[in-house]
Amino acid sequence: MMIPHALILLGVLVLAAPLPGQTAPSAEPPAAERSPTAADAAASTELTAQEAAFAAMLKNATLRGSWAPIDKRLLGKEQEDGYRILRAEKIRGSQWSLVSLFKIQGQELSVPFPVTIHFAGDVAVMALDKIPLGDGTVWSARILFHDDVYAGSWWGADKAVKSGVVSGTITRD
């Protein structure tokens, strides 16, 4: 059975988020083990020109495009999908929060998702690595963002069986 891409991506993002009362895993030592200064805090959240452009591109953004599964290295049928992102906020270093808007049972809900964003020049790359879902599958993704276009791929632990591609355009309200 093929799981719809939007559900996979949503599941990956939701399960990447810490549970209430938990904090996201970090490579940084606990605060008690280091002494951050005000300069450290300011430097970690200052935006470069590329980061500011990325944040502006995703402010009140609608991502509209398509996804297609890859099954045994064969591209499947494309299906339409879309996402709403309210904002992208730099947390520290390459750690960001994408605040997305979802309609659930008629109610709009904004949900922050912790993600890693790397930059290759003016191209932002969202990296999600080995995020477990409730069905026992571990998912990863790489999504590129540039000039109001996004494209990328996602895959399960067994890439040859569970994977797919996604692409589309970005508009702002």
Image (cartoon, grey):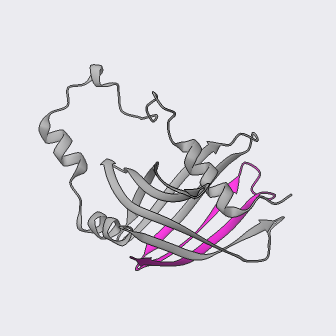
8 left or right, relative to 162 = left
Q: Is residue 17 magenta?
A: no
- Residue 5 drawn above or below residue 22: below
Which of the pair 19/69 is nearer the observer? 19
- Residue 4 drawn above or below residue 167: above
26 left or right, relative to 66 = left
Q: From the image, which quarter does the C terminus lie in?
A: bottom left
Q: How many marks?
A: 0
Q: Looking at the picture, how far across and down is residue 135, in whole percent?
A: 76, 41
Q: Residue furthest front?
A: 106
Which residues are the magenta region? 144-173
Q: From the image, which quarter does the N terminus lie in?
A: bottom right
Q: Looking at the picture, how far across and down is residue 57, in whole percent?
A: 36, 72
Residue that appears at 54% across and 51% down: 128
Q: Residue furthest top?
A: 32
Q: Looking at the picture, how far across and down is residue 51, in whole percent?
A: 30, 63
- Residue 82 drawn above or below residue 95: below
74 left or right, relative to 126 = right
83 left or right, relative to 88 = right
Q: Looking at the picture, how far across and down is residue 7, in whole percent?
A: 67, 57
Residue that appears at 61% across and 50% down: 12
Please tell me in which quadrant of the rendered image residue 159 appears. bottom right
Look at the magenta stretch and give its main secondary structure. strand
Residue that appears at 69% across and 63% down: 5
- Residue 150 drawn above or below residue 29: below
